[in-house]
Amino acid sequence: MNTLIDLTTVATASATQQLRGRTLRLDPVWPEKVAHNWTVTALLPPSFPLEAQPDGSRLRRKHARLWGLDSDGPSRVVRGLSIALPSAAQAGVRAVTAKDADASIDALNEMLVLPPREKTRVDWRIGEPYVDREGVSALVARRATAPVFRTSVRGSRALGGALGGATSLAVGGSILSLATLEDAGVIVSFALIAAAVWLGIPLAKAWSRERAQVSRTAATYRRIADVVWRSLRSAGRVAAVSAHPVVVESERDGLTTVSVETPDAAPADQRTFADALAELFGPVRTPRFLLQTGQGGRAWIVRKVLGRSGEPQYLPVPAAIGRRREDAEAFAALWEREVGPCALHAMDSPEQLALMATARRGGGDAPSALTREEWR
């Protein structure tokens, strides 16, 4: 048997693997055999009034523990639904199950193309060296032209303008000190220079961090990953060892996908880290704490400038970090030092419901962050 069409309702890991194992058996008279396994899934069209979509959920559960070639990149052996559906088709399934009026089951079916059996065998690279190691990474997607945070552009402009004002103040003080020899004039000029330096240093530091979020995105994701790992370690969620996050950016169809992993960490800690990072960049659901980017700051002048910089953006603090207030506060403080200005909001009262609603509406149209299990 080389082809299996799964019409069953079984979705447990053991039953699914046993069922597909029938096609994986070697055939002594057909050494070039390649197995193709199909899962037939029934989805209700968006126009249908019923909300229930049990087969859609079952489709994901069936593939949750199965290894295969990544539909988006056949050079990778991964686990999960991406072995059956490319990312565009997965988005189509989500749109259909969410009753999106623009979604179409016919369009979804057209995305599914049967690869030639010869190509499948080549993609598996049978006989080539391998490491025999599993890893878990977080996948964060955004539009290719967008910054890491939409608050970064406005924040860097506001801080840059304020920094320019402080620089002008220092220049004016210098000119005044050269233009007058009277004691009062010299005192005033030095006071202006001192004020400019006092205001300019925190403005320059904050501007540099905000600007980096726009121009050096890979470095920004690396700093964020480091903050998440260190916060998980301080909270006791991962081993008390150092990790070095690896960040890889790729672009396809107008989207930039950032893969972040900690290959030197234990597998369980890799999973905890990837889940936390995906939660941080995922949709706002019911977090205990929200992190507002492009706001706050340790210096009052930075807080004042950023307080007028426009529409806010909120990130859900990962549950593994936000279980205790002290851990969430330490996370925000570390973010402030390593990434940029921020403000922490505790969702601990009915008065915060409006803020939660604002955060959910401001999620944007980028795909949700995901985790990927890969075998090398």
Image (cartoon, rainbow, N blue to C red):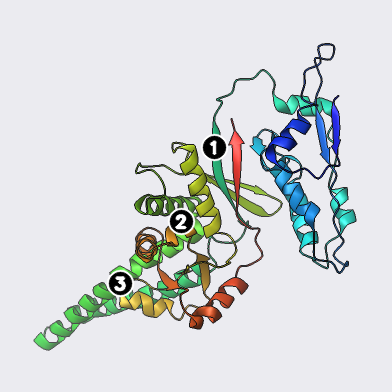
Q: Is residue 320 above or below residue 181?
A: above
* Marks 3 and 1, the one that precedes in the sequence: 1
In terms of image quadrants, where is residue 37? top right
In terms of image quadrants, where is residue 172? bottom left
Give the amino acid at mark 3. Gly
Q: Residue at x 50, y 61 (%)?
A: 214
* Marks 2 and 3, the one that precedes in the sequence: 3
**Alpha carbon of mark 3 to alpha carbon of mark 1: how far?**
45 Å
Q: Residue at x 78, y 33 (%)?
A: 19
Q: Is residue 333 above or below residue 35?
A: below
Most distant residue in the top direction: 29
Q: Name the element at disc 3.
A: helix
Q: Nearer the viewer, residue 171 or 283?
A: 283
> Which callout, 2 or 3, points to the residue nearer the camera?
2
Task: State the image coordinates of residue 57 (x, y, percent, origin top left).
Answer: 74, 53
In terms of image quadrants, where is residue 376? top right
CB-based contact (under 8 Å), mark 2 and mark 3:
no
Checking the image for residue 200, the label placed there is 3
Residue pointed to by mark 1: 135
> Which callout, 2 or 1, points to the residue nearer the camera?
2
Residue pointed to by mark 2: 320
Q: Name the element at disc 2.
A: helix
**Alpha carbon of mark 2 to alpha carbon of mark 1: how far?**
20 Å
Task: State the image coordinates of residue 343 (x, y, percent, origin top left).
Answer: 41, 71
For residue 246, say whether it is visible.
no
> Which callout, 3 or 1, points to the residue nearer the camera?
1
Q: Nearer the viewer, residue 336 or 2?
A: 2
Task: State the image coordinates of residue 363 (x, y, percent, origin top left).
Answer: 60, 68
Q: Is residue 261 left or right of residue 183?
A: right
